[in-house]
Image: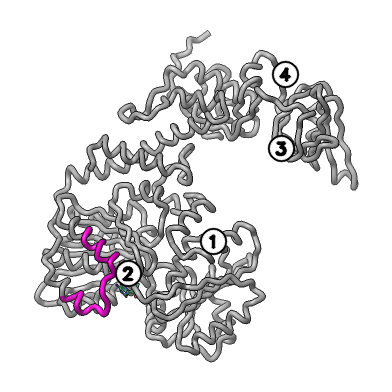
Amino acid sequence: MPVRPPLTLDSPVTALPGVGPDRASQLERLGIHFVSQLLLHRPRRYEDRKNLCKVRDLEKGMTTVVQGTIVACGLKTWSHKTKSVYEFILDDGSGRLHCRWWNLPFMEKYFKTGDSLLVYGKVLNLKPATIDHPETEFAENLDDAAIHLGRIVPIYPLTEGLGQRWLRALIFRTLASCKELVQEEFPQIVNPPSRASALELLHSPTTLDDPEKARQKLSFDEFVSLQFRIQARRKKLEEKAQALPCQGDNRLIKIFLQQLPYKLTDGQKTVLKEIRADLGGKVPMRRLLQGDVGSGKTVVAACASLMTIESGFNVAIMAPTEILAEQHFRNFHQWFNPLHVSVELRTSSRKVSTLFDQGQLRVTIGTHALLEDNVNLQNLGLVIIDEQHKFGVVQRDRFLGKGNYPHLMVMTATPIPRTLGLTLYGDLDVSRMEGMPGGRTPIRTFIRPAAKAIKVWEFVKEQVKKGRQAYVVYPRIEEDPRGLKSVKKETDLLRTRLAPYRVEALHGRMESFEKEAVMKEFGNGSINILVATSIIEVGVDISNATVMVIEDANLFGLAQLHQLRGRIGRGSEESYCIVLTRDGAAESTEKLKVFEKTLDGFQLAEEDMKLRGVGNLVGSDQSGLPDFKFGDFNKDGLLIEKARLLVRENLNLK
Ligand code: ADP
Ligand code: MG
């Protein structure tokens, strides 16, 4: 016999007794390569086999485990063997339980009279007691009885060829022999129970509450690990970077605010105070500005830019779409021209600048094109990223890399739940801009079935007649094999339906100059109705547009719907968002109901996370979020805050 090397947690699973190449490749399919991963294989549920239910005590509708012996079994087929039911009868001394499998005739091969079994499932009927399609486990082989019976037993996710009992025994024995090797991942952060006890609670709980205790510990460790990664960035910044003094002296902002046709809201003022303090601080600003759609973030960005320019530095602003970059360019140009501050636009299709002779201090506005190597941004004091959720951390870093530790402000209207914010943006300081500019009337949202479409279009015409404008949104550009409505086809139909008003299309496959022309004409009111994809989802600001119709809305997520709706309700006129539905799938109906009754973006984000999970919310490829095995953003708010706090303390971050 060859001598086995001593087992460690980093050993491959093949180092374990009974695990050869075949077993190893099965385990691999479950993502288990090393002993440490085996110990973290999370049971999907538990069965209390200390207190097995007797057949005599079964109640209709309960989900439970019964142990007994098969006393009869057989397969019935009909309709030329296309339909079948396999059934066995289990006797546990107190009564008989019928277990049935519909249209799975091969089940017959697995069982025979005399087999001793555990079955788990929901009691369908009582006379006779019946469970359809139960999970089953053989109860023979008394060697292992202590592992599989008489305790709270974990049920693990499996893969083809891998049996429940085999895997359970493997994990049980491995934990018993490796428990001493399990150490705290972060000994500097104390949070009982120990990891070793957590694994014990996970795989061998003594009460049904134990697994949750285990989950919380293991989840906490996951969040701590992530926070160390995030906060290390912050730490490096604080140690290395010397902030450029960019707080300004008010000389431009003063004039700017005087010429602005409105007064800043309290929310805008508060945020600007925080920004000014950051721009004059020792560490470069790293700030996230969260403010709901339409709360007026652009003008805040303009003020921050002016502070920087007053201090003698340049500003760069990146937006996710050309339409939005163009819009910012128009606004900034109009605002800064009287101040003799140059503004330039750089997208892949257009470069425009309005340079003044007396100086080259400027604001550069653009899209991703700004990230290209040949774009040289000099003397950069502040970078601003609008609609941050459309960019990833990598892009953020590249943008920052255009300067020498410039200040950073990222803006987002995608309201994200607080727990997620602390994680995704854990290295940023967060300003939440409260309140909306005054004089707005809340948007009214309606869900209407396709059958009511005619009325909806009549309504749109009425509004246009009153001088308003409308958006109509479809999920697709071209016709789609699934029959989803598309911008191209519907534009033609709507031209007839909404005549004599002018209807034009806008989508991502148009040339930049075409998009720009359409936006310009919609902006000055010569287009009445804009038919678009979700390309208009971010940033577009046209206050005379007060109607939005969204078709096939089930295809959009809640956050996206909210962003779309944010395009209207920007002026003093009453605005209407109408969702035309056709399919009645429960999940999407629930989603749309939430949308109909909730105008608050943050509340919607919480609901969205519950309905769809985190991955969908942030687009996990961009977020840099790891796959949590135990962590759960819906439940773990307190754990996340605690992990962040303790890690920051540990790194001496204030
Ligand atoms: P978002 O936060 O979604 O980027 P915008 O910056 O596009 O919002 O602003 C939405 C609209 O509100 C714009 O038309 C802007 O001119 C207007 N606005 C911004 N601040 C104020 C304010 N203090 N008072 C009145 N209107 C404002
Ligand atoms: Mg905006």
Q: Is tag 2's residue or tag 1's residue first in the polypeptide sequence?
A: 2
Callout 4: SS: loop
For label 4, being within 8 Å of ligand 1 is answered: no
For label 2, being within 8 Å of ligand 1 is answered: yes
At label 1, the amino acid type is Val
At label 2, the amino acid type is Gly
The residue indicated by pointer 1 is: 594
Classify mark 2: residues with Cα within 10 Å, few (<14), some (14-19) or many (20+): some
Q: Position of residue 562 (x, y in %)?
A: 46, 65
Circles 2 and 1: CB atoms closer than 8 Å: no
Q: Position of residue 520 (x, y in %)?
A: 37, 82
Judge by depth and name the residue closer to the eye, 452 or 393.
Answer: 452
Left or right: residue 519 versus residue 170 is left
- From the viewer's perspective, is residue 364 above or below residue 10? below
At label 4, the amino acid type is Glu
The residue indicated by pointer 4 is: 140
Callout 2: SS: loop
Q: Position of residue 639 (x, y in %)?
A: 40, 39
The residue indicated by pointer 2 is: 296
Mark 1–mark 3 Cα distance, whole angstroms, equals 32 Å
For label 1, being within 8 Å of ligand 1 is answered: no
> Does 264 lie within the magenta span?
yes
